[in-house]
């Protein structure tokens, strides 16, 4: 009898090891970043760490390269429970609360020092705003400074009228910004941008150096305007619905591990953008300087647009003033 009980125990142990925890939960995470990108590598490293730390109670599946669709499609899947987390751009989250995009308003934050100061002043406020929409965000993740890239030298808003610029699909602020500069942009989803450049549907993109390099857009451009249009960032957002399916212990593990890995991405991206810019220039892409008059024109139109958002109540006046003060103090 003892031998039989021992045999049952051994069989049970083996089956347990083979099958894993009966209550294992698969956390589904989407990102537009392609395989091999810093963000994707960090997500996969965090996934492995979470699975080990929770002893298999939480499995993590990463959907990279935009296979789950655009940010708008991903957000719908988050609400439906088909996805549990995703890296999302500030512009996409602005559809929930326009204030989340305050650091990325045109010509507002244009230097690393300004970005650091402004983030320190308002980052927690922005994360708290997302929590009101049932999203837990690990922290802001820098994407980088966005430059005009194309084949027409752009030294002023007037030069933009000679271009066919890409508009990120669903970007209301992008549409407003180009309209302020007197340009009609062409909306395309991210996967179609390279084809658009190759076929001439568009001839200009707004991008960080890293993205232009990683997505091969640099193969179809010859000029980069030195003055950044805006500061871009995003976050890794988890749905509250997903967190409620985890134990308190596992929820804390997921939060801590993913936050730590995303913080590393945030710190690494700035160096990568600087290196990518040098690679682009080494490939023969020319850096174009905005004229003093052009800079004033860009800044004036951008400020009018930002003030408009504030005046119609879409942008919190106190939040905007906090950012402007931080930018001014940073120089």
Image (cartoon, rainbow, N blue to C red):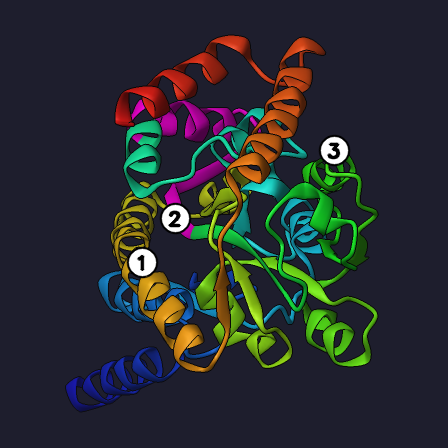
Comparing 57 with 18, the one in front is 57
For the C terminus, which image quadrant?
A: top left
Asked whether disc 1 touches disc 2, contact meaning CB atoms under 8 Å apart, the reply is yes
Mark drawn on residue 180 = 3
Residue 234 in percent (x, y) is at: 48, 46
Residue 308 in percent (x, y) is at: 69, 17
Alpha-carbon span between mark 1 and mark 2: 7 Å
Comparing 116 with 248, the one in front is 116
Instruction: State the SS at label 3.
Output: helix
**Residue indicated by mark 1:** 265
Instruction: State the SS at label 2.
Output: strand
Does the segment drawn in magenta span residue 141? yes
Comparing 49 with 21, the one in front is 49
Alpha-carbon span between mark 3 and mark 1: 33 Å
Q: Depth-wise, is mark 3 or mark 1 nearer the camera?
A: 3
User: Is residue 106 in view?
Assistant: no
Q: Residue at x 74, y 71 (%)?
A: 192
Give the magenta part as a residue range: 120-143
Q: Residue at x 45, y 44 (%)?
A: 243
Crowd band around label 1 with a 10 angstrom C-alpha radius: few (<14), some (14–19), many (20+): many
The answer to whether residue 164 is above or below residue 316 is below
Instruction: State the SS at label 1.
Output: helix
The answer to whether residue 75 is above or below residue 192 is above
Residue 177 in percent (x, y) is at: 69, 37
3 or 1: tag closer to the N-terminus: 3
Mark drawn on residue 141 = 2
Mark drawn on residue 12 = none
Q: Residue at x 48, y 70 (%)?
A: 61
Res 157 → quadrant: top right
């Amino acid at each position: 009898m003892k031998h039989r009980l021992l045999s049952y125990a051994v069989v049970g142990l083996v089956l347990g090891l083979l099958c894993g925890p009966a209550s294992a939960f698969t956390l589904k995470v989407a990102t537009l970043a392609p395989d091999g990108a810093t963000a994707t590598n960090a997500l996969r490293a965090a996934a492995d760490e979470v699975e080990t730390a929770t002893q298999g109670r939480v499995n993590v599946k990463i959907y990279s390269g935009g296979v789950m669709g655009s940010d708008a499609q991903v957000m719908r899947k988050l609400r439906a429970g088909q996805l549990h987390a995703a890296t999302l751009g500030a512009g996409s989250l602005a559809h929930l609360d326009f204030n989340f995009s305050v650091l990325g308003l045109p010509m507002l934050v244009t230097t690393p020092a300004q970005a650091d100061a402004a983030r320190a002043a308002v980052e927690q406020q922005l994360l708290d705003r997302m929590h009101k929409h049932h999203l837990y965000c690990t922290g802001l993740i820098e994407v980088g400074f966005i430059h005009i890239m194309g084949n027409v030298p752009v030294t002023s808003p007037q030069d933009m009228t000679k271009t066919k610029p890409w508009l990120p699909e669903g970007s209301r602020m992008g549409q407003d910004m180009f309209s302020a500069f007197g340009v009609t942009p062409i909306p395309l989803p991210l996967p179609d941008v390279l084809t658009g450049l190759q076929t001439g549907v568009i001839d200009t993109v707004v991008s960080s150096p890293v993205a232009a390099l990683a997505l091969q857009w640099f193969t179809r451009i010859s000029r980069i305007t030195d003055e950044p249009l805006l500061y871009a960032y995003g976050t890794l957002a988890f749905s509250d619905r997903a967190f409620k399916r985890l134990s308190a212990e596992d929820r804390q593990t997921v939060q801590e591990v993913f936050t730590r890995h995303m913080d590393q991405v945030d710190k690494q991206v700035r160096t990568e953008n600087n290196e990518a810019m040098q690679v682009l220039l080494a490939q023969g892409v020319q850096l174009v300087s905005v004229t003093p008059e052009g800079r004033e024109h860009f800044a004036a139109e951008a400020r009018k647009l930002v003030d408009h958002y504030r005046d119609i109540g879409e942008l919190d006046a106190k939040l905007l003033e906090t950012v402007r003060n931080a930018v001014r103090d940073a120089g």
